[in-house]
């Protein structure tokens, strides 16, 4: 797997995931939408740690900085 996520992208995903988790555990978002947010938060955290987004690959997108 070639990395296709830059530092800024990873940081934003992690922050958004943290917000989703807080919204769920404070009871602001409940029910099916709460579960959807938790699953999405898990995906965001996973993709942040491995620096690879499977949705970027088919489109050839990359937010990594260019290295020599």
Image: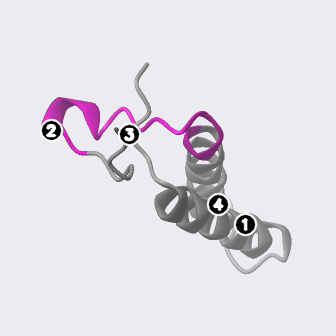
Q: In terms of sequence position, does the residue under pointer 3 or pointer 1 come before the other?
A: 3
- Disc sitting over residue 18 in the figure: 1
Q: 10 Å neighbourhood of mark 1: few (<14), some, or many (≥20)?
A: some
Separation of marks 2 and 4 at Cα, in angstroms? 22 Å
Relative height, residue 6 to residue 33 (above, below): above
Residue found at the far left of this picture: 59
Q: How many marks?
A: 4
**Marks 1/4: CA–CA distance:** 6 Å
Is mark 3 in CB contact (under 8 Å) with mark 4? no
Whichever of callouts 2 and 4 sits on the residue coming sooner in the sequence is 4
Image position of 58 with respect to 4: above or below: above
* Of residues 44 and 61, the one drawn nearer to the viewer in this rendering: 61
Do the residues bearing badges 1 and 4 touch, measured as CB atoms within 8 Å?
yes
Q: Which residue is mark 3?
A: 4
Identify the residue under disc 4. 14
Q: Residue furthest front?
A: 68
Question: Disc 3 vs disc 2: which is toward the camera?
Answer: 3
Gap between marks 3 and 1, in whole Å? 22 Å
Residue under the image location 63 percent in, 53 percent down: 41
Residue 54: x, y in percent? 36, 32
The earlier-in-sequence mark between 2 and 1 is 1
């Amino acid at each position: 797997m070639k990395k296709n996520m830059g530092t800024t992208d990873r940081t934003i995903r992690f922050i958004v995931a943290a917000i989703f988790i807080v919204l769920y555990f404070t009871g602001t978002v409940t029910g099916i939408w709460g579960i959807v947010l938790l699953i999405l938060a898990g995906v965001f955290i996973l993709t942040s740690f491995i620096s690879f987004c499977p949705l970027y690959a088919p489109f050839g997108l990359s937010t990594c900085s260019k290295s020599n």
